[in-house]
Image (cartoon, grey):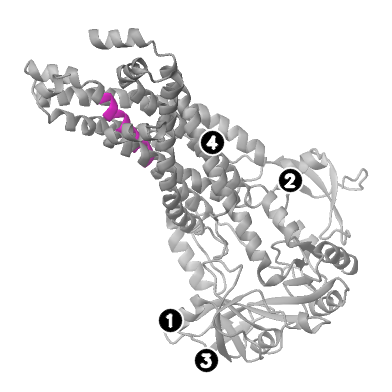
Amino acid sequence: MPVAAFAQTPPDILVSRQLAESEHLTVGTIVSLAVDAAGTGAREFRVAGIYEPTPDPARLGVVPRAVRLHLPDLLDLTRRADVLAGTEYVSSVNVALTNPAEARTFARDVNARLPGVLARPATEAAGAAGPFQVLERFHLAIAIVTIVAATVFLLALTIMLVDERRETVGVLRLIGLPVRRILVQILLEGLLVAAVGAVFGLVLAVLSEQLINTFFQWRYDTALVFVRVTRDVALTSVSIAVPLGASATVVASWALLRRSGLRLARR
Amino acid sequence: MNAVGFAWRSLVRQPARATLGIVGVAAVGALLFDMLLLSRGLIVSMQDLLDRGGWDIRVSAGELPVDSRFIPNALDAAQVIAALPSVEAALVIREAEAQVDRISGPPLRASFQGVTTRSSTSVGSALRAPWTIMRGRDAEQPNEVVVDTDVASSAGLEPGSQITMRASCLSDLEALPVTRLQVVGIAEFPFESTSENTIGGTFDALQAACGGNIGAGANLILVRSTGDPDAATAAIRASQPGLRAATNTEVLGQVQRTGFTYFRQISSVLTTVTVSFAVLLITVLLTVSVNQRLGEIAALRALGFSRTRVVKDVLAESALTVGIGGLLSLPLGLLLASGLDRILKGMPGIPAALHFFVFEPQALVVHVALLVATALIAALYPMRIVSRLPIAATLRSEVMG
């Protein structure tokens, strides 16, 4: 709740953008914070800034109405009457090392010297089952099914398209072109079509990237980026799509090319 | 021969392309089916978990469904709640940390749930904790516990075994003596995540395990109303203004608004993409197929097949491809759903009994409706081609070609 008058400058706090918007808080506003709805032990703070909360996929859909205080201010505000100052606990301590490569050794040392404290390198904190990793595996599984479906359709299409050209292939065989020469031509055509298709797909992905991010960021009021077409993603897509497209063309043509030229050219 | 029979022969005549088309539809259909199962799966599964045991109201000290704050004087509060006319029974749940000794290996960390029922009726007093007994029986005496399957397998326990544990109810720093209790059953705990180990017993058993040092607080009170959960919730809120009470439907509504929206949104996006993909590809397959048979179709028209009839043939071919593929997509989709469910359940904190993909007849109806729409829309353009086919010009072009 904003408070109009104050005797001395209260401690600074930061408020999340979402809280600032919902409560119409601006930089410089004096607010009163308490540990419960009854206002027990309420203290005044000054909004020194508004921050964008770090997006957390595990809390998607929850509007982050959050306040950041200096730790001593938070402890003063939340300390129970029967707890001595300085004996409170904190849930976690982040440590920045001068040499980040020593994170694992440092964590091992802390665990050995401070029983009851668990130290872990930040890279391992999320574990193998963190929400990001699980979502990544889920999306990968969906992508694999999509690729399988697309491959099957592609094969069906190429069989039809190759069949459409059976007479042409038959004539080429009759005028003396060896199977290998025709196959190379078909492979090159397949590569060209697959490359154009892959580029078109990438353009479509880049265009839809903005659309999807805008929609989901609006829907969840978050800065979380949902879709990002990175260089690696683009390269992976092309490296799957182009060989797949070319292979489908060659596989579909192979059955046709095994037949004799006369049989192919016959109407 | 009717249109379906004719379309069937057209498909059989080109087995490779027909098979590939059907397999493609089956793969896309499986993904579509899974996205439909995902769209409401979590909600249905969560509802099932909340309703287990017949408890229809949850009372907590903080935000529901999950909050770490303790309900102060929980036993007294439960007694007052149970005495309300709209309430049949109240079940107090108190959790504590426990370490279970094993014959080999380090002690197993587990959560010990102690429960006690308060009710003014004999029916209410007989109500039990929301866990499901898989083997053996429920714990009833202060020296009895039930354990989950993970604890049972890790510590080599069976109904009838003795379990040795150290429980700490108030602080992790407590140094409590070893307690020996008897395992009387193996149970499934509804909200236990895959990485958790849980032990259940009576409040007295927990008190015994903690050396009587249990305090007056509890984590949660489950309430069963006499039939009107909304009225009972209102009565609880009035009698316990310091606590939060919510019906299972309200908890589910909150979860629906916050926790699982991502999966609903992603399922909507993927459903749209999948259906568009299927429409596009079947349209292309049918169009190419029709274009290759223009001469044949023109000949049929010349022989007396009506325009409507050849249009029906194309529609029937589309329906057969999508129909057979759609049928195959159901078992394929269920198989894929179990794999995807396993992946998503790897998320930290997800209850082991919660499922992301849950079959509902409603999902099947939507699946069938979307496939019918796909077959119709995909056939529109090729149907237009055959309906406007100039018979004489096409035949002449075929002969000249």
Q: Earlier in the sequence, mark 4 or mark 1?
A: 1
Q: In the shown orientation, is residue A251 left or right of residue A48?
A: left
Image: magenta residue range: A148-162
C-beta proximity under 8 Å, tags 4 and 2: no
Which residue is nearer to you in this view: A169 or A150? A169
> Do marks 2 and 3 share a subunit?
no
> Residue B241 location in percent, x, y?
88, 65
Q: Amino acid at mark 1?
A: Gly
Which mark, residue B105? Answer: 1
Is residue B343 shown left or right of residue B207? left
Q: Chain of mark 3?
A: B
Q: Secondary structure at mark 4?
A: helix
Tell me, for residue A14, which label it has, or none.
Answer: 2
Residue that carries the numbered disc 4 in the rendered image: B272
Distance, label 2 to label 3, CA atoms, is: 57 Å
Residue B84 among those drawn in magenta: no
